[in-house]
Image (spheres, helix red, strand yellow):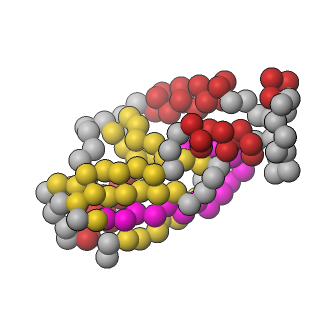
Amino acid sequence: MPQTILTLSTRGQGLYEFTHQAEAFVSASGREEGLLTVFVRHTSCSLLIQENADPDVRTDLLAFFRRLVPPASDPDMGWIVHRAEGPDDMPAHIKAALTQVSIGIPVADGRLMLGTWQGLYLFEHRDRPHRREIVLHLST
């Protein structure tokens, strides 16, 4: 079982933690050491390793990215050409380009080597709910 696909349902923009699913996958593999590669199969969301203790961190990250890349309907975004899928689509692509769609996490003693307050998150950049696929691949 070196690979699986997680499907996460989102409710719109936000950070959706899936650390426990990744830990369960590694545990079920029976492998003691390796590298977990996490890859999201979409262009309008991304992946983050971020603090999972204080929810204010997620609130502030969302606020920062909204300020950094506002919707295409914002007057400052008048230069955007790609508008076919709504005012949140091209900004979602920009946010995904600024973050990452793949993360590697070392595995030792059968556990993810995340820090005490670190969690794995899908970062949804679209306003509407979506079903997102995340590939987990464990290599030795």
In the rendered image, which quarter contains the C terminus? bottom left
Residue lying at 68% horizontally and 43% vertically, measured from the top left: 92
Q: Nearer the viewer, residue 110 or 129?
A: 110
26 left or right of 18? left
Q: How many marks on residues?
A: 0
Compared to 110, does 14 lie above or below? above
Task: Please tell me whether residue 133 belongs to the stretch shown in magenta.
Answer: yes
Horizontal side, residue 78 vs residue 55: left or right:
right
Across and down, in percent, residue 56 comes to: 48, 27
- Indicate the quadrant containing the N terminus: top left, top right, bottom left or bottom right: bottom left
The residue located at (59%, 43%) in the rendering is 96
Give the quadrant of residue 71. top right
Would residue 63 be visible to someone looking at this image? no
Membership of 126 in magenta stretch? yes
Residue at figure coordinates x 40%, y 49% from the top left: 103
Residue 56 versus residue 19 in the image, above or below: above
Provide the major secondary structure of the magenta segment. strand
The stretch in magenta equals 122-138
Q: Position of residue 138 (x, y in %)?
A: 31, 65
Asked which quadrant contains residue 30, the reply is bottom left
Q: Is residue 13 depicted above or below 31 in this figure? A: above
In the rendered structure, the answer to whether residue 57 lies left or right of residue 86 reads left
Q: Is residue 128 visible?
A: yes
Indicate the position of residue 118 as horizontal and vertical percent values: 33, 39
| 32 horizontally vs 104: left or right | left
Residue 54 at what x, y percent from top left? 40, 30
